[in-house]
Image: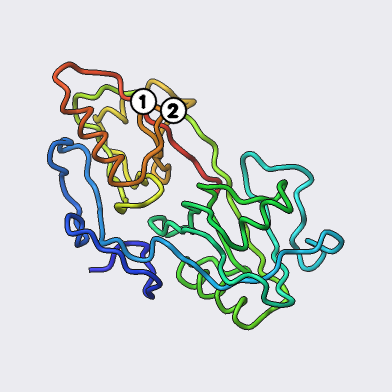
């Protein structure tokens, strides 16, 4: 069964036997109030043939995209890549596709974007940035196809709209029903909150902390200040709940502008 938000095409196919099919149900040891949707590790990393970065003299001068005057710390901004000729063989991006509203950057390795970041630090992409559109295409699967075809066909520009999230912390007890539904993959960049149920620990936190409410669409990336990938983070939460004595559980969340 296809995982929500997964691409219908394959670049790399990863499979973990303990997470081999889509499932939505109570996670053993985590409590009935925490439900998880976990799918086979499929297309979580995209390596794409790519091309040159913009020259300093003419970057962001075509189309409706404009260069940010300074580094954007939170919010939506645009990145434009000029493609006059092939100079790099890969984007060098590891992409998280668990959020169907965009492609989340899970890692940046050797390739186009690493080089772009070095040359243009005020427009550099970061881990956890979400690509909202590519050449005005917004569907995740079609967005990737657009990026790939733009490179293969050597089009003049690849234009991306990017959302950089804000970061905040939530502190709840390690004992009791967490009261949230989660979407993740073994190696996803954290875990996505898809729903919050009434009466759970997270719901109680929200009612007491209006300025730092956790909402569906937020992404949990760290436990106790330590950033983890999807399965490791789930296992960490389970370990916290297994403690005999209740402890405060500190979660770091990201929120994206839509």
Residue 132 position (above or below residue 12): above
The residue at the point 46 percent across, 59 percent down is 95
Residue 222 left/right relative to 147: left
Badge 2 element: strand
Residue extending farthest to the top is: 245
> In the drawing, what numbered circle is on residue 250?
1
**Residue 90 percent across, percent down from the top left:** 56, 68
Circle number at residue 169 = 2
Asked if residue 66 is positioned above or below residue 182 in the image, the reply reads below
Q: Which residue is drawn at 31% across and 30% down?
A: 203
Q: Does residue 84 sit above or below 197 in this rendering?
A: below
Residue 65 lies in quadrant: bottom right
Q: How crowded is mark 2: few (under 14 residues within 10 Å), some or many (20 or more)?
A: some
- Locate residue 193 relative to residue 78 in the image: left or right: left
Residue shown at 55%/46% (left/top)?
A: 257
Rendered location of residue 111, percent (x, y): 59, 62
Query: Which quadrant holds the N terminus?
Result: bottom left
The image quadrant that residue 72 belongs to is top right
Residue at disc 1, secondary structure: strand
Q: Which residue is found at the position 29% from the left and 52% from the top?
A: 186
Residue 19 point in image, percent of width and height: 20, 56
Question: Disc 2 and disc 1: Cα gap in Å?
Answer: 7 Å
- Ranked by sequence position, the earlier of labels 2 and 1 is 2
Numbered label attached to residue 199: none
CB-based contact (under 8 Å), mark 2 and mark 1: yes
Residue at the farthest bottom position: 153
Please tell me in which quadrant of the rendered image residue 17 appears.
bottom left
């Amino acid at each position: 069964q296809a995982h929500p938000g997964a691409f219908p095409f394959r670049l790399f196919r990863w499979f973990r036997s303990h997470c081999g099919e889509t499932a939505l149900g109570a996670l053993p040891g985590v409590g009935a109030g925490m439900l998880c949707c976990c799918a086979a590790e499929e297309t979580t990393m995209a390596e794409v043939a790519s091309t040159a970065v913009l020259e300093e003299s003419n970057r962001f001068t075509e189309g409706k995209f404009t260069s940010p005057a300074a580094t954007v710390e939170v919010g939506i901004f645009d990145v434009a890549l000029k493609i006059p000729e092939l100079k790099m063989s890969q984007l060098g991006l590891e992409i998280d596709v668990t959020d169907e509203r965009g492609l989340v950057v899970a890692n940046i390795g050797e390739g186009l974007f690493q080089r772009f970041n070095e040359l243009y630090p005020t427009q550099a992409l970061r881990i956890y940035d979400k690509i909202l559109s590519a050449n005005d295409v917004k569907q995740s699967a079609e967005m990737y196809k657009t990026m790939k075809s733009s490179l293969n066909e050597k089009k003049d520009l690849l234009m991306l709209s990017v959302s950089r999230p804000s970061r905040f912390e939530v502190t709840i007890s390690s004992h009791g029903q967490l009261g949230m539904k989660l979407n993740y993959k073994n190696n996803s960049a954290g875990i996505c909150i898809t729903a919050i149920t009434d009466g759970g620990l997270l719901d109680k936190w929200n009612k007491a902390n209006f300025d730092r409410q956790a909402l569906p669409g937020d992404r949990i990336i760290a436990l106790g200040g330590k950033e983890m990938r999807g399965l490791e983070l789930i296992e960490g939460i389970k370990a916290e709940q297994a403690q005999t004595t209740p402890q405060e559980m500190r979660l770091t969340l990201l929120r994206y502008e839509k």
